[in-house]
Amino acid sequence: MEDKIIELIGVSREFDTTLAVDNIDLYIQKGEFVTLLGPSGCGKTTTLRMIAGFEVPTSGKILLNGKDITKIPPYERPINTVFQRYALFPHMNVFDNVAYGLKLKKITAVYEDANGNRIEKKEKLSRNEIAEKVSRVLKLVDLEEFEKRDVNTLSGGQQQRVAIARAIVNEPEILLLDEPLGALDLKMRKDMQLELKEMHKKLGITFIYVTHDQEEALTMSDTIVVMKDGTIQQIGTPTSIYNEPKNAFVADFIGESNIFSGTMVDKFKVKFINHTFDCVDDFPLNEKVDVVVRPEDVVIVKAGTGAVDGTITSTIFKGVHYEMVFTVGKTEIVIQDTVEHKVGENVGIKIDPESIHIMAKEFVSNVYDGYITKKNTVCFADGEFECDVTQLYPNSHLDDEGYLITEKGEKIDLTDVDVTVEVGLKDIEIIDNDEDGDACGSIVSIIYKGDHYQIIIRTDEEEEDFVVDTEYTWNENDRVSVKIPKDKIVMKLKQPEGAR
């Protein structure tokens, strides 16, 4: 597309052994308001810093208007950045803060000598030119009466506008904003969201915004790029990402969601919470799927007149609506409604087919590369686990020395033999200390799925993931270990490269 202003092609950034950004492809169109959205550590700020030139990609390239700028320093890029800490000069007033870059800037002036020859000179801007530019941008950010004010006397919102004015006075093609509203209180943050959106319309330049706040992203953006673990999970408009999340992570991170495990039982029919619902997404028969229903799309009806009956077990007033928990069996469904239903009330629910979003399951089981030790245990995912090695050869057994004897009587030493290991999501036990398990790590993700939690535990050294379905509550960043019963570890001999 000819209107691409920034393009990232296969961009990765590694710090020591940590992969902060992992082979991402992304393009941004001229004049767009694009938000990089994700939790802390997902790679969004590193991506922004590579666009700005503060970080150089480990691999891949960055194009600006089709030109490779991967190794061009920041001061040679037509890009300015506004940070969360505004970095204003405390000893300067508003005018001088905004004018600082202009006073250092040199422009190319063209003259003709007496013989008509063209002469180019690098010159600084005149005082009048600087004053005119500063006046124009201060008016744009609604600070035209503040030129002489000490920046230390300004509110947080006003300081943020000064930082934006300083960034745009040099007329960049792209403005980068790294969580610029993070230091503001809630009301001011909401006000500034609308002001930034309006400012973007007035300027007409490309905004690339970084935040972990879903409301900010949904309020301001033309396009949202959802990131996790250094990778892009989904790109789309706020409406498409909210209504059509690509996976459970996006559904959970963007707004509030009910996420259930379901099964496709017929064409456009999905079974979850022990009932078959009509839907508009077509998946193969009997495929296990994730089902997303937003709280505002669940309709409470009189018991016996809906799809499923249950009980209201919690109700909280949230200002514009009541947030209620409807329980059927062991499954909880969050509902948002302007009409309150009391705790203990028996009611039914209805869900329109258009409000049921079906997604392919991201995790069906845990699969790892491993190897057998001389003790006939298996090593994988930073741990060593008891296992049954006889499953590698049908009808085999172990002799007294620990060698495997095949059905044909062949004696095999399994030491260092490579295997593929598979473990079910429900077959892993989480332990709240490092000592009693077989592999240690930290909880990096928790998604509630109606009647259980899906938890991701990342190991310390190799950063392997254990995905666990559990009914027990844990917290992100908890230090834990895992234990897997011997009979739940399924192994196969790893096929050599190119083997059929």
Image (tube, grey):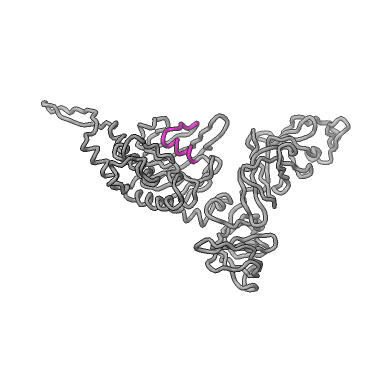
Outermost residue, left direction?
Answer: 114
Q: Is residue 485 visible?
A: yes
Outermost residue, front direction?
Answer: 153
Please tell me whether residue 298 is drawn above or below residue 435 in the rendered image. Answer: below
Question: In which quadrant of the rendered view does residue 180 lie?
Answer: top left
Span highlighted in magenta in the image: 44-58
- Is 52 part of what is drawn in magenta? yes
Outermost residue, right direction?
Answer: 400
Q: Main secondary structure of the magenta part?
A: helix
Q: How far across and down, in percent of the image, does residue 450 sit?
A: 64, 57
Please tell me whether residue 349 is drawn above or below residue 243 in the rendered image. Answer: below
Question: In which quadrant of the rendered view does residue 479 lie?
Answer: top right
- Is 460 part of what is drawn in magenta? no
- The foreground one among 372 and 298 is 298
Which residue: 36% across, 36% down? 90
Which residue: 57% across, 60% down? 293
Placement of the N terminus among the 4 image quadrants:
top left
